[in-house]
Amino acid sequence: DLHALMSINANEGSDMHKLISPATDDTEGDVAASGKLLEYASFREAKEAFEREFLRQALAAYGTIRSTALHIGLSHPAVIKKRAALGLEAPKKAKN
């Protein structure tokens, strides 16, 4: 399942697996049963939607592109490119 995959791919000590929590009810977590799978015209569209939401949540959770990259196991330049390709805004810098 997705939660197990996230745990395997995440860096040790990462909290990324907490961003996407599995449903406790089998039918509740089943995308096909919920009809959400049919919202996408293709696998590519579904993958892009997942990547956009995953990266949006990761950027919000970790605050910077560099920290996000470290926690999700991508390089800093890869996160910058993926963020731009998915049309996500850069994280807001904290005011001191």
Image (cartoon, rainbow, N blue to C red):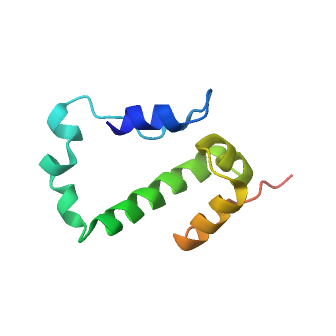
Number of marks drawn: 0
Instruction: Using the rendered image of the protein, determine whether residue 51 is visible from the camera's viewpoint.
Output: yes
Q: In this view, does 19 lie to the left or right of 95?
A: left
The N terminus sits in image quarter: top left
Residue 11 location, x and y as percent? 61, 34
Residue 76 location, x and y as percent? 71, 56
Q: Is residue 32 left or right of residue 24?
A: left
Instruction: Using the rendered image of the protein, determine whether residue 89 is visible from the camera's viewpoint.
Output: no
Q: Which of 43 and 62 is in front in this view?
A: 43
Q: Residue at x 63, y 59 (%)?
A: 79
| Quadrant housing residue 80 | bottom right
Residue 24 location, x and y as percent? 25, 28
Q: Is residue 48 above or below residue 25?
A: below
Q: Is residue 64 above or below residue 70?
A: below
Residue 82 location, x and y as percent? 58, 65
Q: In this view, does 72 lie to the left or right of 19?
A: right
Q: Which residue is drawn at 39% across and 31% down?
A: 4
Which residue in the rendered view is the most extreme toward the right? Answer: 96
